[in-house]
Amino acid sequence: MQLYRRGSSGPAVAEVQSTLAALGLLAVVPSEPMFDDATDTALRAFQQQRGLSVDGIVGDETYRALSAARWRLGDRLLSLASRPFVGDDVAALQERLSELGYDAGRVDGIFGIRTTDALRAYQRERGLVADGTCGPATLRDLKQLGRLVTGGRPQALRESEQLHRSGASLVGKTVVIDPGHGGADRGACASGLEEAALVEDLAHRLEGRLVASGVRAHLSRSPGDCPPDAERARFANDIGADLLLSLHVDRSPSRRPNGVASYHFGSGSGVHSTVGEHLASLVQREVVARTGMLDCGVHGKTWEVLRMTRMPAVRVELGHLSNPDDAARLADPAFRDTVAEAVLVAVQRLYLPPDLDAPTGVLRLADLARL
């Protein structure tokens, strides 16, 4: 789609401004649909709240998030469809079902099979027509019941319990490695380096180490392809992956930004993947400890590759090609080997019980064979 930013105008800008105003982020809708400074400030606030990249640009992902934000539970009938319903109303329904003890899956705002099954189970137990459709009768019934699950977010508890039951060994686990961009989309380019080529190489180094540890490792794309993030997430879901690891590098107009950052599914409303956040923290700490790169922290985002996966997913932004020091490191194959080992160790540490875990930066590949 066309990108809209400060200085843009037209009907699409008017639609964006109307949505931002309805959300209470834009005080006044301009009489002329011009993307002005107030709209830019409001859009950045929206992106921050929704866990999107805060760039002041309405692209595909921000536009879909704006469209989803328009819906409130009860505005429309919700049911399983060939093109799934997506919106804040779906997220509200998922949150409500989870609070009542039904496994609607992650609160991602997508009306899928798991949400349908949870809704049907609720309807059966409440004596309603179990058609998997959230209509007036179901809504009235939902409003009558109080929260039944206490002591934490239900989906977070389920994630943690599933991790505990899976055991400490990596043998037999399935991991999808997602090298960013690909095909004609080379991603960030600077210092004579291309993001797509670097993360492909890193992905293969990580794949070899995972396979040697007994993991079933899969790449989300071939070198000539660049599937959208939603398709990468769907691939991981379809093969029943236990984890997804998305690999990227960055660039900036300035030479100064540098360092590594890790991301997990999380929004400003507090909905997040507990296990994903833990894995992102482990990856971040291991990479920083073993490479000495600047620690740019762990952050929650609602990017599709993180939000649409049914398993814990982490995206790593490994340095800036526009920074001479980061670029020199990324160009070194030995550095990429170190990063691959750091990520593997982080994955292993995710599954280890506290009494077997090792301090950050200490566990080595040879140690993994003895676990």
Image (cartoon, helix red, strand yellow):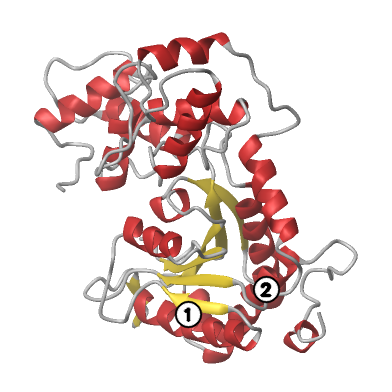
Q: Residue at x 31, y 81 (%)?
A: 223
Where is residue 189 shown, x and y percent of the image?
Answer: 32, 73
Residue 117 to residue 327: above or below = above
Residue 229 to residue 143: above or below = below
Q: Residue at x 16, y 25 (%)?
A: 14
Mark 2 and 1 residues: CB-CB less than 8 Å, in contact?
no
370 to the left or right of 49: right
> Which element is circle 2 on?
loop
Residue 40 seen in the figure = no
Q: Which residue is mark 1?
A: 203
Q: Please name whichever residue, 134 or 106, is drawn nearer the observer in this view of the structure.
A: 134
Quarter location, residue 134: top left
Q: Residue at x 81, y 77 (%)?
A: 362
Where is residue 190 shown, x and y percent of the image?
Answer: 35, 75
Q: Please name whichever residue, 150 or 127, is drawn nearer the observer in this view of the structure.
A: 127
Q: Residues within 10 Å of mark 1 (few under 14, many from 20)?
A: many
Residue 77 to residue 232: above or below = above
> Which element is circle 1 on?
helix
Q: Which residue is mark 2?
A: 292
Cα separation, mark 2 vs mark 1, equals: 21 Å
Where is residue 185 shown, x and y percent of the image?
Answer: 25, 70
280 to the left or right of 165: left
Where is residue 318 shown, x and y percent of the image?
Answer: 52, 69
| Type of amino acid at the residue the image marks with label 1 | Ala
Which of the marked residues, 2 or 1, is nearer the chain's N terminus?
Answer: 1
| Type of amino acid at the residue the image marks with label 2 | Gly
Residue 161 seen in the figure = yes
The C terminus lies in which quarter of the figure? bottom right
